[in-house]
Image: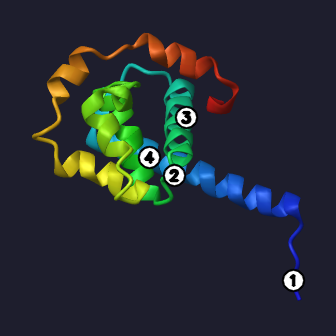
Amino acid sequence: MLKLRAEQMAAFSSAASERHVQSVLTYVRDRYPDYVKTIPLDEALGRIRWGLQLAGKAGVTDSRAAALFTVLLFGAGPTFYVHPACKSRLKNPRLHPNERVQSLFAASEEIPWDEIRAARDESAWQTIAAAPQAR
């Protein structure tokens, strides 16, 4: 019987995680090129890693939902999730965390995206980039 050591499992997990980071980067470059065209590659990758980790900490388990959350960080701003309209949806106990992310899109007319984008704090990216987990 095949047995995998913890180090081997971690290596497989890390490789899969990096593939997901790369796929999100490809998605953003293809669909939203303005979000990353002026950002150095290492910084874009760090932001994506951070976004996926943040989604994971919020209980998001679906790779697509995590990617959508990360795209929102780029499009609406790195702190969009603290705005009351987004926060209430992302904390909704009646929905699974994956569905909470989807609810942001389903209720997009109820969420003041222009207001959120206008209040975006680009300096938050510097804090994120300096964090060890973003590398």
Q: Check the image and name the residue furthest to the left.
A: 109
Q: Which residue is mark 4?
A: 24
The foreground one among 123 and 85 is 85
Looking at the image, residue 127 sits to the left or right of residue 65; the answer is right
Q: Which residue is mark 2?
A: 59
Dot 4 crowding, Cα within 10 Å, few <14, some 14–19, many 20+: many
Q: How much space separates mark 1 and mark 4, taking CA atoms?
A: 32 Å
Q: Earlier in the sequence, mark 1 or mark 2?
A: 1
Identify the mark at residue 2; answer none if there is no mark: 1
Residue at image position (62%, 58%) is 16
Q: Farthest residue in the front direction? A: 93
Q: Residues within 10 Å of mark 3 (few under 14, many from 20)?
A: many
Earlier sequence position, callout 3 versus callout 4: 4
Instruction: Please name the amino acid that badge 2 sits on.
Output: Gly
Q: Three-letter amino acid code at disc 4?
A: Val
Which numbered circle lies on residue 50? 3
Rendered image quadrant of residue 110: top left
Question: Where is 82 relative to 89, above or below?
Answer: above
Q: In percent of the image, x 34 and y 52: which residue is there?
A: 100
Tag 2 secondary structure: loop
